[in-house]
Amino acid sequence: MSFQHPSMLWWLFVLLIPIIVHLFKFRRHKTILFSNIELLRNLQEQTSHTNKLKHLVVLFLRLLSLLFLVMAFAQPFFPTDNLSSKQEKLVSIYLDNSISMQLRGSQMTLLEEAKQRAMAVADKFGLSVRFRLITNDFEPRWNKTMDKSELLNALEQIKISPVSIDFGDVIRRNQAFAEQSVEKERFLFALSDFQSSSTQWETLPKDTTLRLFLLPALPGATSNLYIDSIWLDGPVLQKGMEVRLNLNVVNQGSERVLGIPVQLELDGASVAVTNLDVEAASSATANLQFIVPEAGLHRGKVSIQDYPIVFDDEMLFSFAIQPKLKAMEIYETKPDPWIALLFDEKDDIELAHHQRLQLDFEALNQYQLIFLNQLEVLPTGMVQALEQFVENGGSLVLLPSENGRKDYNLLLQNQGFAYQVADTAKTRVFSIADKHPFFDKVFIKIPENADLPIVYKHFPMQLTEKSSAFVLIRLLDGSPFLILNSLRGGGKTYGLALSYDEKQSNFVQNNLFVPVNYRMLLMASSVRPLYYVAQNEVEIPYKIPPSRGETALRVVDDQGLFSFLPTVDNALGKSSFLLQQLLPGSTHYSIIVNDSLKEVFSVNANRKESVLRFQTSEELSALKNKQMFKQVEVLDALQGANESVNMASVDGKQLFKYFLVFVLLFLLAEALVLRFWK
């Protein structure tokens, strides 16, 4: 038998109290005078002998009740498998180092309390036991077994990470460890706040050889006010344009919050301020307006004021205003004069013309917009390069031809629409989807008798089944005149039912021609998101300009605390790199190429960490009934940094209740002796 709190055994000195009481009689005797006591002598001797035996029995029962009471508070248990034995074991410790673990506990941050409790867990095992450490960022340096001293040193090095992971991923990683080890017994101690929003508890992987111990940590405050997301009204950003930034603020508390100050900063200067009211357990949207600054890279920040939880009170964003927008026309026989008339000799637009056979596929990713002008043949390599161009965020405009229709459809096989045989029936444009963001601020109002383009010849376009393409402009019979298909990465494909040949329509002479083409170019200029959400890995798209020499690429944060040398995947125009081991909190990052600043992007902490809804001990204990693990125990929530770990739950049978039952039995026996022993 072992004790969880052996220091409580010092209280066994209280056993001296009943002994002292029984050895020394403190009752004062009263003298009674008798004329003759001969008749009482035999009775007195017999009663004195009986009382001595009764007192000894009462003393013995009292000593036993006190003994078992002290031992009960010392938490006795029978170890079923000695933790210090030489049996091979693998003990994995998952230490949640997500942002929510920097909240305040009873004495210090939850992360520091969890570290100390993890050390207490390690102390309960023998020196021969090997340990593995798991954190949210799955750092490669912990992908090894370590002894107790190495584990304690590793725990000291753990810092807050912006990564939020599903607890199921921790189970899977532990299973991967098991495949590499030969240990007979596997333990996993999970020290976390167990946020409900960060884990799909219904889909936890099953592992019947794992003994799982959950040690929940609870913060002192659970009411929170945070910025959930930000977005712009429109996708286009131009120098001097008035833009409205929207933000959604969530109030998790049970009380209404009034007059929250909201501030917008751009490049370190405050440009807009407003106040916001948010109802209890609800959300509200605020709007802030600013003027788009000069061309260049710009960093922004939206912030609110909330206490004591402050890690989610600001959200960073960034954007780039290009000094020139780059467009390219790929033609079959000669350039289109109307495209040249639109974009040539413009200070803020750079237009290039390339004949199909002289095209450099690797240069496509340097342009925002590409026109395919009546091409007759699209080689396989060109189709693949154009598909990759759109996937990387580029915009593609298709001006069809009769001979190239089949090749165009090969390019469009994943775009949701296809070209049909030419139709020479005269028709005209009938309707415009002016409420679509593509036409934002283009029209004040379209009159009923508007002068819309007349069409003499066109190539009908048919939407495929389950197509996500949107018809921006329709002809009189309802067939598409202009189709837009947008990809998740920002890429866009525009399908026109005709080319810019005057024999096919008067579209090039109509008032609709200029705004449609300029909107296609402007919509292509803003394809990068305002910010990224921190994950274990963040994929950042980046187009490296062609260079004759070697390109040195670095990613650094604004405070100089982080430096990363990424490897860019640039196959077939695909330009991106994976960013790992991010700094905690929200941070601006810069992309440096050959010591020159080329790009800025922002990463914000995952807002899952802001939802302060935690699994209760009862909810965690429900895992016991699912029979998914060999053993599941939920140990008491953290009450302080010095709290001990109840190892009786880990590897033994608790006897606390049994000892209390014996205490009650001994007290009952004492009462019966005093009541009925005459």
Image (cartoon, rainbow, N blue to C red):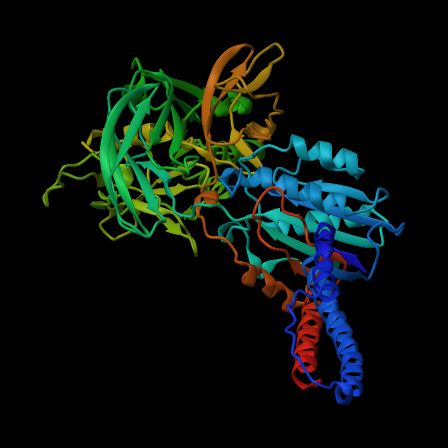
Q: How many marks?
A: 0
Which image quadrant is residue 621 in? Answer: bottom right
Asked if residue 458 can be seen in this view, the reply is yes
* Residue 179 place in picture, x, y as percent: 80, 49
Q: Is residue 324 left or right of residue 271?
A: right
Q: Residue at x 41, y 19 (%)?
A: 353
From the viewer's side, name the closer residue of 147 and 284: 147
Eyeballing the image, is 231 above or below 474? above
| Quadrant in the picture for the C terminus | bottom right
| Quadrant in the picture for the N terminus | bottom right
* Residue 629 place in picture, x, y as percent: 70, 61
Q: Is residue 162 left or right of residue 351?
A: right
* Residue 503 place in picture, x, y as percent: 27, 34
* Residue 215 place in picture, x, y as percent: 62, 51
Eyeballing the image, is 648 above or below 62? above
Which image quadrant is residue 399 in? Answer: top left
Asked if residue 208 can be seen in this view, the reply is no
From the viewer's side, name the closer residue of 378 and 171: 171
**In the current view of this chain or complex, which residue is farthest to the bottom?**
39
Eyeballing the image, is 515 above or below 495? above
